Image (cartoon, rainbow, N blue to C red):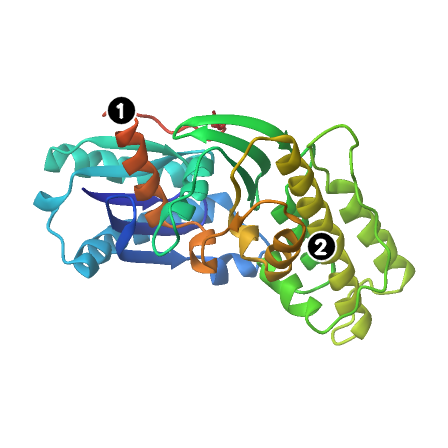
Amino acid sequence: MLILGIETSCDETAAAVVADGRDILSQVVASQVEIHARFGGIVPEIASRQQLLEIVPVVRQALGQAGVAHQQLSAVAVTLGPGLAGSLLVGASMAKALALAWDLPLVGVNHLEAHIYANWLAPAPIPSFPCLALLVSGGHTLLIFMEGHGRYRTLGQTRDDAAGEAFDKVARLLGLGYPGGPAIEKAAEAGQPRYHLPRAWLRGSHDFSFSGLKTATLHLAMQEGLLPPKVGDPRIADLATSFQEAAVEVLAEKTARAALGQRARQVLLAGGVAANKALRQTLGQRCPLPLQAPPPQLCADNGAMVAACAFYLFQSNKAPDPNLDVQPNLRLG
């Protein structure tokens, strides 16, 4: 079963062709990182306009790279939300037009669900149910108990900033650039965790909070005389290391505790922040269950995860709907 997956929830225009929910035949991603870097973050209007420019070439390239004609496709899948309304509309409009023109089923996919399904893509082994998923990205931080395909229970979520959002804001504060996750990770390679920053444990809950950590980093930077940031000052690297260690420790420890309280067989890591090496290493050390994570390139937004998710929705008899509409605030479950 060949599925064309289209992803335009934010600032990446992506398309991929995936066979049987596992094998990636093509993967094309047009990134807007350089465009938004000058603003220190994503500008929604610019993102959606760029999506319009990229969507047709990206889809055409994905089909060509896979060596697949539209007659060979079984369905078209697209992200419906959550995400930026304008960006989502570009992908959904393209997918609807293709499905109508090619007389194919149209499958709407939850962006958060798709990130989890990056773990089903080859060469990784197929995950075993039930499993616990830690989804960490720029807009979301969730602990999800997954009983089967399409069967989710949210155990915990952030009460304020998402982990990726905190990374972006702290990176901007320290003058490290955008996107913040890779910038802080790179700076931390040259630093030492010599600053103590708070950990929000929220006892009795699986929820997360990163707002206090972000504010404490700001106050410490001011106390150290690092605002405005001093390029090349080794204290910047030390502060980045200390921030990353605090954020990663909370994510890993709370996931490990949740794993002990659930009858899960393994833990899945997903989302853009899942590419962080420190998070992978710390979670692997602390987690009492086998840990599985996609390769870093599949942690970021991509079309293959959308196509994989759609395949398993088909297997679970989730009926395609040609009248699907975007849902910027879509939740999981």
Could you tell me which residue is drawn at 82 percent across and 70 percent down? 235
Query: In which image quadrant can residue 158 be found?
Result: top right
Nearest the camera: 39 or 330? 330
Q: In this view, does 297 lie to the left or right of 174?
A: left
Locate residue 44, reporting x and y percent.
49, 44
How far across and down, in percent of the image, does residue 12 sit? 41, 51
Q: Which of 291 and 222 lies nearest the eye of the viewer? A: 291
* Kind of residue at badge 2: Val
Task: Indicate the position of residue 174 as horizontal and vertical percent values.
Answer: 74, 62
Q: Is residue 158 above or below residue 180?
A: above
Q: Which mark sits nearer the N-terminus, 1 or 2?
A: 2
Task: Name above or below for residue 176 compared with residue 326.
Answer: below
Residue under the image location 45 percent in, 45 percent down? 10
Front one among 250 and 29: 250
Badge 2 marks a residue whose secondary structure is helix
Of helix, strand and loop, which one carries label 1?
A: loop
Residue 226 sits above or below residue 42 on the image: below
Query: Residue under circle 2?
Result: 170
Q: In this view, does 95 lie to the left or right of 35?
A: left
Q: Which amino acid does label 1 sit on?
A: Asn
Query: What is the distance, in whole Å, between disc 1 and disc 2 at their CAs?
Result: 44 Å
Mark 1 is surrounded, within 10 Å at the Cα level, by few (under 14), some (14 to 19) or many (20 or more) other residues, namely: few
